[in-house]
Amino acid sequence: MSGGEGRLASLIGDLRAFGAAARKEWRLLRRYPSLFIGFLFWPIALPTAYVLQAQGYAGSSVAATNAFASRAGTGEIAGFLFLGWATYMWISMILWGPGTALRTEQVRGSLEAIFITPASRLVVIFGPAVSQVIWALWMFAVVGMAMGVFFGVDLGLAAVLRALTVIILAVPALYGLGALFAAIVLRFGEVHALVQTVRGLFTVFCGMTFPIIILPEWARAVALALPPTYLIGDLRHVLLTGASLTDLVPDLAILLTIGIALCLLAVVAFRSTERYARRGGSLAQY
Amino acid sequence: MTSAALPASWRKDVADEWHAALAIARKELHIAKRYPLNLANEVLQPLYQFLLPSLLLGATFAVGGRALGLSSLTGTDDLAGFLFLGVVVGGLVGAAFWEIAFSFKREMDTGTLEPAWLTPTRPETFVIGRAIGAMVIAAATSLVLIGVGSAVFGATYSAGIVAALPAIVLASLGMLGIGYLIASALLMLREPNFFVDATSFLFAMASGVAFPITVLPLVVRPVAYLLPTTYALDLLRQYALGTRPLLDSRIEWLALTALTVVTLLVGQRVFLRTEHRIRIRGTLGQH
């Protein structure tokens, strides 16, 4: 077999392993039906609570409602909050997903066996995340329906397609983040506290419930360094203010650049963690 | 046993159960002290997951730095005070659902529930012991958060807040009843995480932790009026912030007391029936 043929065979093998890893995660999810109810409940319940809170803040004051519209760039309060929380839930899934998958393998004692296989490490890092894409699409669909049915937010097909493009362009950034997270989990063996901290950081800085212009300057600088800020802002722009994709080219370019950087960083971090774990024999320790 | 001896034996039983409840509470507090980061998270988590996003949303509606919309509904424009007091009652809800009720699930998982129930201690004493431990942590967390609200976010509480303390004590007893009910459900469920997560969230929201309950849809609002925590929180905000009451204050005190008694009695009865049923079925060790 020539070098080229060998590389092709290896690539096909890795793709098959990638598909198998995704299928396995999907099967595990199917074993816990209560998760399905959760994926229907939370995308509606959590944003609805904040819509009610916003109604409490608006009260009967027209000035308060106008203040929101001028700061947020839209008077569509329900849409604004639903899109913010949908992104929050997607990020939660990504942060919990790959890290927890590796941690679970570690606890079950199957992680060492996986590392002995000839499959690429990219399969180990990104494979579990693929099944999460299905849930992300499902969640955005539930959010879209809830916005339309309960709050009368009208999302046109063209706007939905633009939003899908934004979501696809955000995939490298968010999944790079998830993979980086997985590497950290493998190194330190703890997932809960880290997820809560990072999720808290995103909630406070990235504008899930508010436009980032109300943040002080230093906090806005932090927000602009975090990929979810661009995702939330761009989704709101295309779905609520009718912005076109060309209007958002600078934002999307930043999002994609951060995404590529995060994916590369994740691969480097994962390799370094793996070397550390192999040398210290800590791969199976937890 | 003579009739004269009965009260003495009854008193001894009560004293024994009380000692057992305190021992369980001490055990829970010992465990909590072993995880200082988790204790710190009791304060930090409400801050970054609820209070900061809610305050920032409130800032988006502010007119000249004032919460005019909130003031039009509740009579106060002290947004920080409104939310930080909400978290006090949110802490009670969390304690009932996660610390009182869900601790049974944790014991089921570790396999210690069956041996514990083989001791002569009454099953409801385990609930009371956990409730005491959970309420001590909730009270400490609330005090810290109220302090943070005042020192960092400018919440201003009037001295009248002290007059609302009996309402919080009553609500804590009511939440013990809710803890009994949720624990009963947990003992019957195999995978209760979603159930506890969703019901505690809905309970807190319906109590008005995040917003005035007058913004709830009309079909949901009657549920809010059936929760003891709704009245406790409304009384707390009235005394501390001068908010407009939902109902006449005397009616609120009466409703809070009545709902607390009903919740406690119903909760305990349901819990004992559930416990009896699972002893017969022999499913206590299954999870």
Image (spheres, coloured by chain):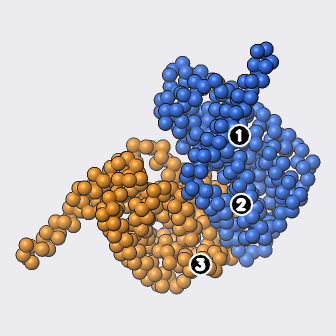
Chain colours: A blue, B orange
**Chain of the residue that carries numbered disc 2 in the rendered image:** A
- Amino acid type at circle 3 is Arg
Marks counted in the figure total 3
B246 lies left or right of B34: right
B242 lies left or right of B192: right
How many residues crowd mark 2 within 10 Å: few (<14), some (14–19), many (20+)?
Answer: some
Give the CA distance from mark 2 to mark 1: 21 Å
Q: Residue at x 78, y 74 (%)?
A: A62
How many residues crowd mark 1 within 10 Å: few (<14), some (14–19), many (20+)?
Answer: many
Could you tell me residue A239's position as x and y percent?
Answer: 83, 58
How many residues crowd mark 3 within 10 Å: few (<14), some (14–19), many (20+)?
Answer: some
Give the CA distance from mark 2 to mark 3: 25 Å
**SS category of the residue bearing label 1:** helix
Give the CA distance from mark 1 to mark 3: 41 Å
**Is residue A135 shown above or below A43?**
above
Residue lying farthest to the front in this orientation: A1
Q: Residue at x 47, y 84 (%)?
A: B250
User: Could you say which is closer to the camera, residue B13 or residue B232?
Assistant: B13
Residue A95 in sight from this viewpoint: no
Mark 2 highlights which residue?
Answer: A142
A147 lies left or right of B140: right
Mark 1 highlights which residue?
Answer: A175
**Chain of the residue that carries numbered disc 1 in the rendered image:** A
User: Could you say which is closer to the camera, residue B219 or residue B152?
Assistant: B219
Residue lying farthest to the right in this orientation: A246
- Amino acid type at circle 2 is Val
Foreground tag (2 vs 1): 2
User: Could you say which is closer to the camera, residue B171 or residue A192?
Assistant: A192
Cβ–Cβ below 8 Å for labels 1 and 3? Answer: no
